[in-house]
Image (cartoon, rainbow, N blue to C red):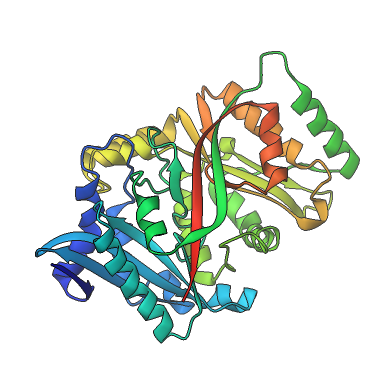
Amino acid sequence: MIEVREVKTRKEKKEFLDFPLRLYKGNPYFVPPLYGDEKKIFRKDYVYYDTCEAVYFNAYKNGKIAGRISGILQNASNERRDEKRIRFTRFDSINDKKVARALFDAVEEWGRSKEMDTICGPLGFSDLEREGLLVEGFDELSTFEEQYNYDYYEDLIKACGYEKEVEWVESKIYAPDEGDDSLARMSELIKKRYKLRIAPADSVDDFLEKYADPFFDLLDRAYYNIYGTVPFTDGMKKMLISNFKLVIDLKHAGVIIDENDNLVALGLCFPSMSKAVQKSYGHLTPMALARLLKAIKHPQILDLGLIAVAPEYQNKGVNAIIGAELARMLREDGIEYAETNLNLVDNHSIRNQWKRFNAVQHKRRRAYKKSL
């Protein structure tokens, strides 16, 4: 017998949060989110609830939890794109099509009750959350920013009537061959042509004070038409700045300004936190904190967080400056490689810049949609 219940009680909330930790226990590739951050989704003052509504469901098979799913009504996204969509996210299930069907039926009915006509996902509240279903690369360690899933998930989703909408690929980026200075030469040429330079900063606080506001404005403009993105709210900005202060190292930030100190482009990398949070299942125990601090201070792998170029500078070679900065990080800081995280397959400007590196494509993800 399969029963689906909307998550309301303290016990049901804990079951929702704990289910993926149980499902992937012992899996060497799964990286949990920080448990404390995930708990915030059940708070009334959660940062996204000023523009969103959400619902959460657990599925039980013979009285035992067997799956979970969340539905999101992202009003800001719908208004921007003139759509009537809900998103599904945090879908996890045992390999049972009846369980998956019951979960999707519940979230789809919720979407219809909100007078929406389409459901899509996996997509979170914004593209700052985990998104996309892993369809290739099941034997690769997830980054902290992305979700791992078993290979049977795609069959479960397709069996519920969903079809592919977009696709992302991910790559490991190694430094260019020794002696290859083509990126550096092109970077200097582009900087001279457009009178650009790397933004100076004495500290992270100084960096944020100078560039936080133009940083978010640039992201909103550069990401305006990218799938799944939403405008930054004040709450999102505050959350991101708080996170930056914990993990950002100015050695791993490339911020490009023009002769009038206007922000033109940026590329931010973060130390990989995957292994640091795996053993504690996302809980910040004293040992986990020690591992996290070590990963931040002495990173071996970098995760590419945000790369953006102002629309008026796109297709002018500015990506070469970001690429040259990344090559410098890989060569000078003892970094083994960088993970690109998600690149849309049709985002050729981003994907083309990896051709100047020794790049290995190792993962693929998809998002799906269905009419309600």
The one of 215 and 220 positioned closer to us in this rendering: 220
Query: Farthest right residue?
Result: 193
* Residue, far top: 179
Q: Is residue 195 above or below residue 183?
A: below
Residue 199 visible to an observer of this rendering = no
Residue 160's quadrant in the figure? bottom left
Q: Quadrant of residue 92?
A: bottom left
Residue 176: image x %, image y %?
Answer: 66, 21
Q: Is 299 situated above or below 317?
A: above
- Vertical placement of residue 145 versus 295, above or below: below
Residue 212, horizontal then vertical, whole percent: 61, 58
Number of numbered discs present?
Answer: 0
Residue 230 or residue 162, whichever sits in front: 162
Q: Is residue 9 visible?
A: yes
Q: Residue at x 62, y 46 (%)?
A: 345
Relative to 40, 306 lies left or right: right
Q: Residue furthest left?
A: 63
Q: Residue at x 21, y 56 (%)?
A: 18
